[in-house]
């Protein structure tokens, strides 16, 4: 029986998650994410797929983040007609996120094409549009956590809570039958223990191969207590001076809701009544509604809070939802007393750019970076200490105080990744994906340094690698499965 796994995305990088299983000629994708980051990276999304979309039997989607789901509409546009299996809340979130992605596609392509036309470069088409997103939504098959589903005659999957964002899943896959069958576990993006709102990542004990994310493989996050102290000190200090705004670039799904919840929990302690808190993102507003509706998937603390204070929902009280562009632009006239949560989380698009333009030069304003910043993004430039930033073609001085609050990350850190892996019986072989290579090397060394942990085999996936799963626990790399015909087109 043929059984291979090819690494087609998020190999030695964080975005563009995409892996291809081939079981006896039946092809199934794990994730189909958008590549994000620098302009050159983003252009890679326009390259053809490494396979023929019409020949893909099904997709299993780990969670709604665009770096995992963002090329699904392009996949459908390119001929994929099969089912997309995902957790129910992920399906709902994709309805919001992919629609937004389609809108951004249209706008960004128009902007890019203006420049390309000037330089006599061929014009680009948007990767996909809203109609493609509608088709994706029809192809979804919504699953509950813990529900084992037959995807093909030779493949069963089961999703468990990954504790990363609402609906996020660790994917267990059973390939083949009988003595030759193999079990693969794909971590998706792993959340953290004790994170607000969500349950802890599910621990799994059996696997023949583990495919593990490694975003923060080289570092430890600050503890929750320290992180909360850090946030408190920022709010307190700014209140004393009280002549600036606080900007929080945040992913619309996950981080935005987490911040709203923290503001609810610490409203008194952080003296937040002196601030006007604005969630300035239509997508985050819709996502918040989906979080509110899927309350049964949250952790016990959150459920208790929701029960305890009916009419004062932890995600809906104390916050102004800024939906229209006009309302958002009005905020630009306010120079102090605002806390603005807006996307995008890496400052490479969305309303946060307008707020940065109006606040970055003010030394009494604060920018709190509280999420992962991919290489090449404006957010990363800020973290790396850029003295100025180009926004809408204008150079803006960075005088505002910049804070990097790493402890709010939605990704497991090194210790939490090792803890998650440690739960597997018999240290199964592991392949690292979804991380920058420096972080991956450090994590790999840590895995192998601990004799109680050391996997029989461990590698960092390279783009285009193809592993023959039939020989597990031995690693046998098979010829590259990349569809040469597609590449020649
Ligand atoms: Zn994610
Ligand atoms: Zn991711």
Image (cartoon, rainbow, N blue to C red):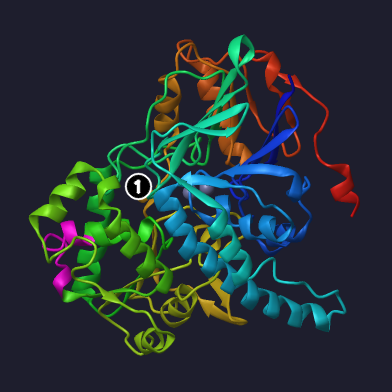
Q: Residue furthest left?
A: 308
Residue in the foreground of this view, choosing between 176 and 247: 176
At label 1, counting other C-alpha atoms closer than 10 Å, the crowd grade (few under 14, some 14-19, many 20 or more) is: many
Magenta stretch, residue numbers: 263-273
Q: Residue at x 59, y 45 (%)?
A: 31
Give how far across and how far down residue 165 sits, in percent.
39, 49
Give how far across and how far down residue 422 sits, in percent.
42, 20
| Residue topped by disc 1 | 407
Residue 339 appears in the picture as rendered: yes
Residue in the foreground of this view, choosing between 217 and 81: 81
Q: Quadrant of the N terminus?
A: top right
Q: Is residue 111 magenta?
A: no
Q: Is residue 271 magenta?
A: yes
Q: Residue 223's image quarter?
A: top left
- Identify the secondary structure beneath mark 1: helix
Q: Is mark 1 within 8 Å of ligand 1?
A: no
Residue 63 shown left or right of residue 139 in the figure: left
Give how far across and how far down residue 453 sits, in percent.
47, 15
Q: Quadrant of the C terminus?
A: bottom right
Q: Residue at x 78, y 46 (%)?
A: 50
Q: Residue at x 43, y 60 (%)?
A: 251
Q: Is residue 282 above or below residue 93?
A: below
Residue in the foreground of this view, choosing between 27 and 349: 27
How many numbered circles does the render carry?
Answer: 1
Q: Is residue 152 above or below residue 69?
A: above
Q: Is residue 300 above or below residue 98?
A: above
Give how far across and how far down residue 342 sits, in percent.
40, 70
Q: Residue at x 31, y 76 (%)?
A: 245
Residue in the foreground of this view, choosing between 108 and 56: 56
Q: Residue 403's image quarter?
A: bottom left
């Amino acid at each position: 029986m043929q059984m291979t796994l090819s690494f087609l995305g998020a190999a030695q990088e964080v975005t563009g998650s995409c892996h291809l299983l081939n079981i006896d000629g039946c092809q199934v994708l794990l994730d189909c994410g958008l590549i994000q980051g620098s302009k050159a990276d983003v252009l890679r999304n326009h390259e053809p797929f490494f396979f023929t979309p019409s020949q893909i039997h099904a997709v299993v989607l780990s969670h709604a983040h665009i770096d995992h789901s963002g090329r699904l509409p392009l996949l459908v546009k390119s001929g994929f007609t099969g089912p997309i299996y995902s957790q129910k809340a992920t399906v709902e979130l994709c309805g919001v996120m992919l629609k937004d992605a389609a809108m951004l596609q249209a706008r960004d392509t128009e902007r890019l094409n203006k420049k390309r036309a000037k330089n006599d470069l061929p014009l680009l088409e948007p990767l996909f549009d809203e109609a493609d997103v509608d088709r994706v939504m029809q192809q979804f098959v919504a699953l509950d956590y813990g529900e084992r589903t037959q995807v093909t005659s030779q493949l069963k999957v089961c999703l468990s809570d990954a504790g990363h964002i609402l609906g996020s899943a660790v994917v267990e896959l059973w390939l083949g039958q009988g003595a030759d069958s193999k079990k693969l576990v794909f971590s998706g993006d792993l959340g953290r223990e004790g994170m607000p709102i969500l349950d802890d990542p599910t621990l799994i004990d059996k696997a023949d191969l583990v495919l593990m994310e490694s975003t923060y493989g080289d570092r430890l996050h600050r503890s929750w207590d320290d992180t909360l102290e850090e946030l408190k000190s920022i709010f307190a200090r700014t209140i004393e001076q009280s002549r600036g705004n606080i900007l929080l670039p945040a992913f619309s799904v996950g981080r935005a809701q987490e911040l709203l919840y923290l503001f609810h929990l610490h409203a008194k302690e952080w003296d937040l009544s002196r601030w006007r808190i604005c969630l300035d993102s239509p997508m985050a507003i819709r996502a918040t509604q989906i979080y509110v509706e899927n309350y049964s998937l949250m952790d016990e603390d959150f459920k208790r809070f929701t029960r305890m204070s009916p009419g004062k929902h932890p995600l809906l009280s104390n916050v102004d939802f800024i939906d229209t562009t006009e309302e958002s632009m009005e905020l630009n006239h306010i120079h102090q007393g605002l806390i603005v949560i807006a996307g995008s989380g890496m400052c490479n698009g969305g309303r946060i750019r307008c707020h940065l333009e109006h606040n970055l030069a003010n030394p009494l304003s604060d920018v709190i970076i509280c999420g992962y910043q991919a290489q090449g993004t404006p957010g990363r430039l800020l973290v790396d200490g850029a003295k100025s930033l180009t926004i809408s073609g204008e150079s803006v001085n960075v005088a505002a105080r910049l804070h990097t609050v790493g402890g709010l990350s939605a990704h497991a850190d090194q210790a939490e990744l090792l803890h998650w892996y440690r739960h597997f019986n018999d240290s199964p072989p592991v392949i690292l994906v979804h991380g920058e290579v420096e972080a991956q090397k450090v994590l790999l060394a840590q895995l192998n340094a601990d004799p109680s942990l050391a996997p029989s085999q461990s590698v960092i996936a390279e783009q285009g690698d193809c592993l023959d799963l039939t020989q597990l626990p031995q690693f046998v790399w098979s010829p590259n499965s990349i569809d040469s015909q597609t590449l020649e087109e």
